[in-house]
Image (cartoon, helix red, strand yellow):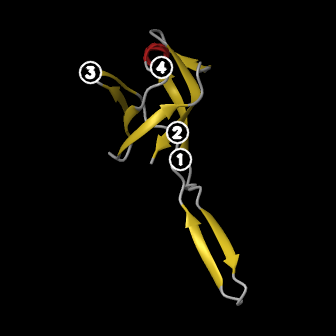
Amino acid sequence: MILSIGSDSITLPNPDLGDGLNLNIKVKYNKTMTGDTYSYIKTPTTRKLVLKISNCALSVFRLLCTFCDDHANEVIDLEDWEGNNRQVRLINFPLSATVTGHNECEDFVSFNFDLEEVI
């Protein structure tokens, strides 16, 4: 997964994925005086992406925090785990992480990364 804006970019490990996709589509029903029923589908202009990332190196997490500090209010390009390109904004910042393991060289963390996709 790659976040980029201009010449600044960061590569993150792929998130832990569930088995569903949640789209926020709303349907509105109207009934006329003659008894006819009409339905209208309202498609959202944004979509919330909640990504849980596990076993990320602490050094990569620190780079992500710096990247988010530098580009907090900007639209960021996201190339996701399937190769799709999305335009996103950061929702939860500052990020907080939980140390989940370590080896002789580095600690590893898990964190939630919430983004808002601009559709």
Is residue 36 left or right of 115 when viewed as pictured?
A: right
Give amino acid for label 2: Glu
Give amino acid for label 3: Ser
Report, in whole angstroms, how far the alpha carbon at label 4 lies from the one at label 2.
14 Å
103 relative to 89, above or below = above
Location of the N terminus (image quadrant):
top left
Q: Residue at x 34, y 28 (%)?
A: 4
Q: Is residue 80 visible?
A: no
- The residue singled out by tag 4 in the image is 68
Give amino acid for label 1: Arg
Q: Point out which mark residue 47 bears.
A: 1
Is residue 79 left or right of 111 when viewed as pictured?
A: left
Q: Earlier in the sequence, mark 4 or mark 1?
A: 1
The one nearer the camera, 81 or 49, is: 49
Q: Residue 93: give x, y in percent of width and height.
A: 58, 22
- Marks 4,1: beta carbons within 8 A: no
The one nearer the camera, 19 or 28, is: 28
Report, in whole angstroms, how far the alpha carbon at label 3 lies from the one at label 4.
14 Å
- SS class, disc 2: strand
- The residue singled out by tag 2 in the image is 116
- The residue singled out by tag 3 in the image is 7
Q: Residue 98: give x, y in percent of width and height.
A: 63, 21
Q: Is residue 30 visible?
A: yes
Q: Residue at x 47, y 20 (%)?
A: 68
